Amino acid sequence: MDIYVRQGDSLWYYSQLYGINIQLIIDSNRGIQPNQLSAGQRIRIPGFIAQNYQIRHGDSFWGIAQSRNLSLDALLLANPNINPNRLQIGQTIRVPLRITWRLVQGKQHYDFSRMISDIGRLQSVYPFLRLTGIGNSVLGNRLSEILIGNGDKRVHYNASFHANEWITTPILMTFLNDYCLSLTNSNSIRGLSTFPLYSQTMLSLVPMVNPDGVSLVMNGPPENETWRKRVMELNRGSTDFSGWKANIRGVDLNDQFPARWELEKARNPGKPGPRDYGGEHPLSEPEAIAMADLTRRRDFARVIAFHTQGEVIYWGFENLEPPESEILVNEFSRVSGYQAVKTIESYAGYKDWFIQDWRRPGFTVELGTGTNPLPLTQFDEIYEETLGIFLAGLYM
Ligand SMILES: [Zn+2]
């Protein structure tokens, strides 16, 4: 919600008036000088929208504010050009409305376009979210990163490296929404106040690493005739893409990282296909390159890649992980009920590369059980299991 500064107003006053932490207001208005507001300047108040309301017989500002649990001045501030003593029946005013419900409905067919639309809605209500483009997929879909928090500890979560594991995207988006809700309503999540997490960490989210693959699994082959023919061939003529994990060129993005890539190459298919092909060389695919570049640029303290399935958490790579990894994974395991597994015979994954090159904690979390794509009937259960990991990744 936008308001316009009056003479003598301050961000601190707005914070009190709307019950929103001042840091969230500052972070929602980047580029302004918090101590040098000028009259008429636009300020965005996170966690609120302005609803139109038509004045009826007998209405007063005081009564309207009272009935909505707002202070009178919160209502006056939202209506700078209206004289509260001369309200007219049928006149439209703006009434601040606190958002207390989820904007993201994750338990549905959650494809790339829905994610993009949800990111836009979240950012308009929660302008303290920062959105960056980290690259483009093979088909030119923009790869989005969302940043939340202004702390020093940089934490990264990603989802949908693998196409048919797309349920990880709405799970992560739902967490982002719940985190925003808890911050703007000062509600705890599982007894944990989240504002300290916000001020101590900067959380980076890439909710869909492989949008082309996800679209293939969810919506079928691309319109473009060349690509359509190509993916049908790679899929051995079948129109059933539910087993597809790779990107649109048939390269498995989680076998693309320079961490004993040759070993992974040797044990996997030698040509493109629905899964497990590691490419002609490490980091040949734009989606993998975007993730590598982002990771180098941000200098993350820890990373978690969300996959399905098996209810396990992989936390080691070639004994290169630091001792902290084991402490973290024990907590992740405790809060989710998932089993901690140090290593399996697998290389060239994103978390492998992160552990190898940074010697910092990196994890692959496998959500849920069953055949991919996991059914949405598992959504609520998976979310409950994962929520603890999302939080522990920040508070630990
Ligand atoms: Zn996977």
Image: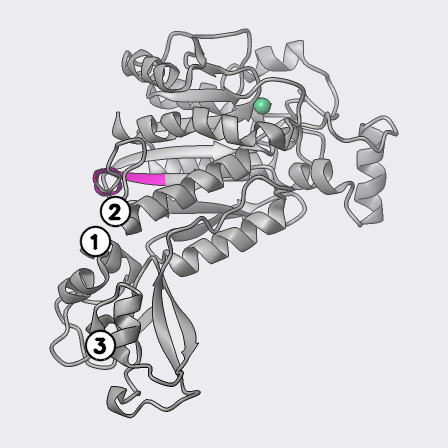
Q: Nearer the viewer, mark 3 or mark 2?
A: 2
x%, y% of residue 322? Answer: 30, 14
x%, y% of residue 393? Answer: 33, 28
> On the image, numbered disc 1 is attached to which residue?
21
Tell me the number on the disc at residue 186. 2
Where 96 sits versus 378, above or below? below
Q: Quadrant of residue 48?
A: bottom left
Q: Quadrant of residue 269?
A: top right
Residue farthest toward the right in the current orientation of the protein: 237
In the picture provided, is 271 more to the left or to the right than 212? right
Q: Which of the two labelled residues, at mark 3 and mark 2, occupies the earlier sequence position? A: 3
For the record, the magenta segment spans 196-203
In the picture provided, is 160 more to the left or to the right than 102? right
Q: Does residue 58 belong to the magenta stretch?
A: no
Q: Which of the two labelled residues, at mark 1 and mark 3, occupies the earlier sequence position? A: 3
Question: How many C-alpha atoms fall within 10 Å of the one at disc 1: few (<14), some, or many (≥20)?
Answer: some
Give the residue type at disc 3. Val
x%, y% of residue 70? Answer: 25, 66
Q: Secondary structure at mark 1?
A: loop
Going 66% across and 27% down the picture, which residue do you hit? 373
> On the image, numbered disc 3 is attached to which residue?
5
As measured in the structure, the alpha-carbon distance from the residue carrying label 1 to the one carrying label 2 is: 8 Å
Q: Secondary structure at mark 3?
A: loop
As measured in the structure, the alpha-carbon distance from the residue carrying label 1 to the one carrying label 3 is: 18 Å
- From where the camera sits, is residue 4 visible? no
Give the residue type at disc 1. Asn
x%, y% of residue 364? Answer: 47, 21
